């Protein structure tokens, strides 16, 4: 086996059973991976410096193609169902053999990385892929080991990522030709049939979501930033709800934009990079993120590129609404250099309410915080998953990240409740979705209003503001604040038809109650009482 690269681990690929590859490229830096990607025709160099790639017809996660190997060591800990689907170990073993055979005679790219900024809880991850740009993606997204660590790097988990290798469902036990298979016993993830790089990132997140609760650490699908006084804040929310945008605040230090752990030591980022939505980015609204789209080292997925000028059109959604930018977190000017923060002072739960009935901001009691954490209400936005149409779909994604939670949601909710109580954390629900009507009739909440309200909440300026009780959802809604028009704070006042608002609000409240029935036996009476009032 021929091997090249600045740091070749003594713990070689043969330990995995991988032999006879043409050339193994180890731990290449960004410039070298650019050269490889361009040489192999994997993408184009844009005028501003980013590498622009296309992912084919898979422009988002293939959520229904993820499976967990059913094996004795983890079987009792998995929340089996529509999200965590089982696959037999025989199918996994067969696909692994076929993937190892497929790699013989081919070039592969290896990146050794840390997942987890806190040395006490970090996990070593090795990403083996056939695409140079996927190796750059992994290098951007995770934490680089020191040179001395790389020479003897021993992975805790390995990911084999082969976009051009397709499963045969009737033989391999998969749903389609696409597959994401997790084997906790072998500490191995197999990905095939899709070029969407987000599958790599989310696989690592799923691994940590399984491993860390056993050590008393709450893994979270969230962003984290810190104010000048060291006051940390957590932002929960699914893709497209504003998690990355709102946490990239020039007045606060960004710890991370997507995935974190909360231990007895404080908060820590799982990643070393960001994976931001790029559609309709502007220098005015999101200057820090926008700047990354004109920088060498950034990977742009499915962004339209002028073939002559190599200029970008960030507004063009021809390929997908889910255009993405992957870049090291250091590209954000005020980003943390450690990935660590103290225990949070504030939790912000973000939802993109497609019904247009939730207030732009509401104060949550600790019990309501647990309720809304378990509910995870939002709208899935177009393009973030394969099969979604042009319009958002109202959904409940427990823990604001159900597809990545291997354990029962009650495990994560219990840890959250304990941490909120222990550290006296104030909690808010923020609607970044629609107002003035449902999607198609109303309009998206102005980002300037959302920023102003979030800033006021983080700084404690809303703590003493008088509030009203929302009759439909039982939420405490500030009557004024942050210079935002008072009618915006009362969503019913933004609708031209009050009766239509009432009907839609009752409909959504009923959806909350219907969804929460699955958790009622797993929480105490105080959390159950935090539900919206049931219609008489």
Image (cartoon, grey):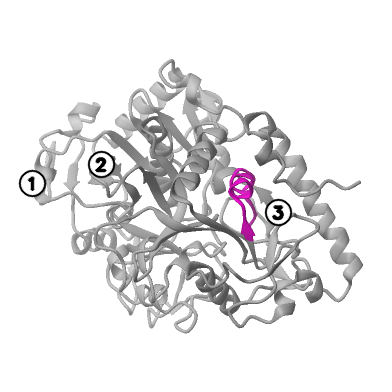
Give the percent coordinates (x, y) of residue 333: 30, 74
Give the percent coordinates (x, y) of residue 149: 12, 44
Report the front residue among 295 and 99: 295
Q: Residue at x 70, y 39 (%)?
A: 528
Which residue was labeled with disc 2? Answer: 106
Which quadrant of the structure image shows residue 22?
top left
Q: Residue at x 58, y 76 (%)?
A: 447
Identify the magenta region.
363-381
Which residue was labeled with disc 1? Answer: 148
Report the front residue among 506 and 79: 506
Q: Residue at x 80, y 56 (%)?
A: 472
Which residue was labeled with disc 3? Answer: 394
397 w.r.t. 43: above or below:
above
Label 1 near label 3: C-beta < 8 Å? no
11 w.r.t. 134: above or below:
above
Measured Cα–Cα span from mark 3 to mark 1: 48 Å
Measured Cα–Cα span from mark 3 to mark 2: 44 Å
**SS category of the residue bearing label 1:** helix
Q: Of tags 3 and 2, which is closer to the observer?
A: 3
Any magenta on residue 375? yes
Q: Earlier in the sequence, mark 3 or mark 1?
A: 1
Give the percent coordinates (x, y) of residue 124: 25, 39
Any magenta on residue 91? no
Q: Of tags 2 and 1, which is closer to the observer?
A: 1
**SS category of the residue bearing label 3:** strand
Which quadrant of the structure image shows residue 218?
top left
């Amino acid at each position: 086996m021929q091997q090249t690269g600045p740091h070749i681990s003594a713990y070689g690929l043969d330990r995995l059973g991988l032999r006879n590859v043409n050339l193994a490229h180890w731990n290449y830096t960004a410039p070298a991976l650019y050269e490889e990607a361009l040489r192999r025709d994997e993408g184009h160099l844009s005028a501003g410096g980013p590498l622009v790639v296309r992912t084919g017809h898979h422009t988002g996660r293939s959520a229904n193609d993820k499976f967990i190997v059913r094996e004795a060591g983890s079987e009792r800990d998995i929340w089996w169902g529509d999200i965590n689907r089982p696959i037999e170990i025989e199918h996994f073993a067969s696909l692994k053999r076929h993937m190892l055979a497929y790699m013989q005679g081919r070039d592969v790219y290896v990146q050794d990385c840390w997942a987890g900024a806190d040395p006490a809880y970090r996990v070593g991850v090795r990403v083996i892929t056939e695409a140079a740009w996927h190796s750059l993606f992994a290098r951007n997204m995770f934490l680089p080991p020191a040179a001395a660590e790389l020479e003897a790097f021993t992975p805790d988990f390995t990911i084999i990522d082969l976009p051009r290798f397709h499963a045969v469902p009737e033989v391999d036990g998969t749903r389609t030709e696409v597959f994401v298979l997790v084997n906790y016993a072998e500490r191995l993830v197999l990905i095939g049939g899709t070029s969407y790089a987000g599958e790599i990132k989310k696989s690592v997140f799923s691994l940590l979501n399984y491993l860390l609760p056993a050590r008393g650490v709450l893994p979270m699908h969230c962003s984290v930033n810190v104010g000048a006084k060291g006051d940390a804040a957590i932002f929960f929310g699914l893709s497209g709800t504003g998690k990355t945008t709102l946490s990239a605040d020039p007045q606060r230090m960004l710890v991370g934009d997507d995935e974190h752990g909360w231990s007895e030591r404080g908060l820590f980022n799982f990643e070393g990079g960001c994976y931001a939505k790029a559609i309709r980015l502007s220098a005015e609204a999101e200057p820090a993120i926008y700047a990354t789209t004109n920088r060498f080292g950034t990977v742009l997925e499915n962004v339209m590129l002028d073939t002559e000028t190599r200029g970008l059109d960030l507004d063009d959604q021809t390929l997908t609404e889910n255009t993405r930018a992957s870049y090291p977190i250091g590209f954000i000017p005020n980003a943390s250099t450690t990935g660590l923060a103290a225990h949070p002072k504030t939790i912000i739960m973000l939802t993109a309410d497609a019904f247009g009935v939730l207030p732009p901001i509401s104060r949550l009691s600790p019990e309501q915080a647990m309720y809304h954490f378990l509910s995870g209400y939002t709208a899935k936005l177009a393009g973030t998953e394969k099969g979604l149409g042009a319009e958002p779909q109202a959904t409940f994604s427990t823990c604001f990240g159900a597809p990545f939670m291997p354990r029962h949601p009650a495990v994560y909710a219990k840890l959250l409740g304990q941490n909120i109580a222990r550290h006296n954390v104030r909690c808010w629900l923020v609607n970044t979705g629609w107002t003035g009507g449902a999607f198609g009739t109303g309009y998206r909440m102005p980002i300037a209003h959302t920023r102003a309200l979030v800033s006021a909440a983080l700084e404690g300026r809303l703590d003493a503001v008088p509030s009203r009780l929302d009759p439909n959802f039982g939420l405490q809604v500030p009557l004024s604040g942050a210079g935002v028009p008072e009618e915006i704070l009362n969503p019913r006042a933004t609708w031209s038809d009050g009766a239509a608002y009432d009907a839609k609000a009752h409909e959504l409240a009923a959806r909350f109650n219907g969804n929460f029935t699955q958790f009622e036996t797993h929480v105490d009476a105080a959390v159950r009482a935090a539900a919206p009032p049931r219609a008489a």
